[in-house]
Image (cartoon, grey):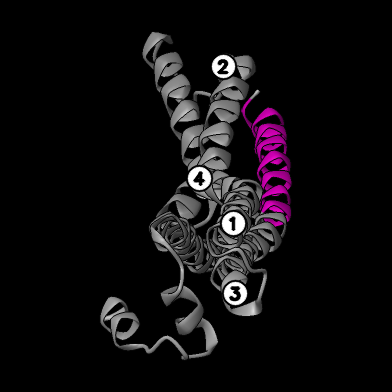
Amino acid sequence: MLISLLAQASPIDGGIIGLVRRSGPVGWFVIALLLSFSAISFAIIIYKGIVLRQAYSQSRRFLDVFRKSSKFSEVNSVCAQLRASPLVGVFQAGYLEVNQQVRGLQQGQQPNPAPRTTVKSLESLSRALVRAATVEITRMERRLPFLATTASVSPFIGLFGTVWGIMKAFEDIGRVGSASLATVAPGISEALITTAAGLFAAIPAAVFFNLYNSRVKVLSAMVDDFALEFLNLVERNFT
């Protein structure tokens, strides 16, 4: 549809459509590439905004449930409802490790009317929590590098289009032998539109990368704090 609109535009059309129409093949390629970066970036921005918002809100709810419950089994029963929270993955990894250690000790003990529930190794539990925390933080950071790449690369792609447009303007001057506005306008317009396209792709990507990166850091801190809280709770009650 965009191509048909550009094809129908007359040489004297103004606005963005007119500027794009007067661009050459290289300018069109640069604009198409930058629009692709921009479209993917906006899709990631919307997706990660929803994911990180849900992750934070569900993490707060999970912490409330965890701190009010007296049994890990009660906490585990609500995990399916709060899957967006990175704390759920950490808790389930720790819960699984505790269960495995407790079952292993109970199987090796002599029959006892009231065996005491203990864990065998806090170091193993700590490693399980660290591994789960790393997985969850990596999941939170997924797709954010593309925003950083767009923010850093798009201005240079736009700059390439700018340089090419200026070269085209000088070439037109040399061919026509005149530096009139009608001669240099196509090259200059191509340079300006590619510059604008580069900034259009780069600025939102840079802003939202920094915003989402700060939110991921907050969630990472919550994950680390929860892992320590879980480890301390197990040490008090299972050793």
* Tag of residue 124: 2
Give the number of the mark in front: 1 or 3.
1
Q: Secondary structure at mark 4?
A: loop
List the residue tagged with mark 3: 185
- Which quadrant holds the C terminus? top right
Was residue 219 drawn as part of the magenta stretch in this picture? Answer: yes
Question: Is residue 204 rendered to the left or right of residue 142?
Answer: right
Pointers 1 and 4 in contact (C-beta within 8 Å): no
Gap in Å between the C-alphas at discs 3 and 2?
A: 70 Å
Task: Tell me if residue 142 comes above or below residue 18 in the rendering.
Answer: above
Query: Looking at the picture, which amino acid does disc 2 mark?
Result: Ser
Q: Residue 138 in the image: state x and y as whole percent.
A: 54, 38
Query: Looking at the picture, which amino acid does disc 3 mark?
Result: Ala
Query: Looking at the picture, which amino acid does disc 4 mark?
Result: Arg
Pointers 3 and 2 in contact (C-beta within 8 Å): no
Q: What residue span does the magenta drawing correspond to?
A: 213-238
Give the number of the mark in front: 1 or 2.
1
List the residue tagged with mark 1: 174
Give the number of the mark in front: 3 or 4.
3
Q: Main secondary structure of the magenta part?
A: helix
Q: Is residue 64 visible?
A: no
92 or 48: nearer the eye? 48
Give the number of the mark in front: 1 or 4.
1
Q: Residue 159 in the image: state x and y as whole percent.
A: 64, 52
- First in sequence, mark 1 or 2: give its number: 2
Quarter of image, res 52: bottom right
List the residue tagged with mark 4: 142
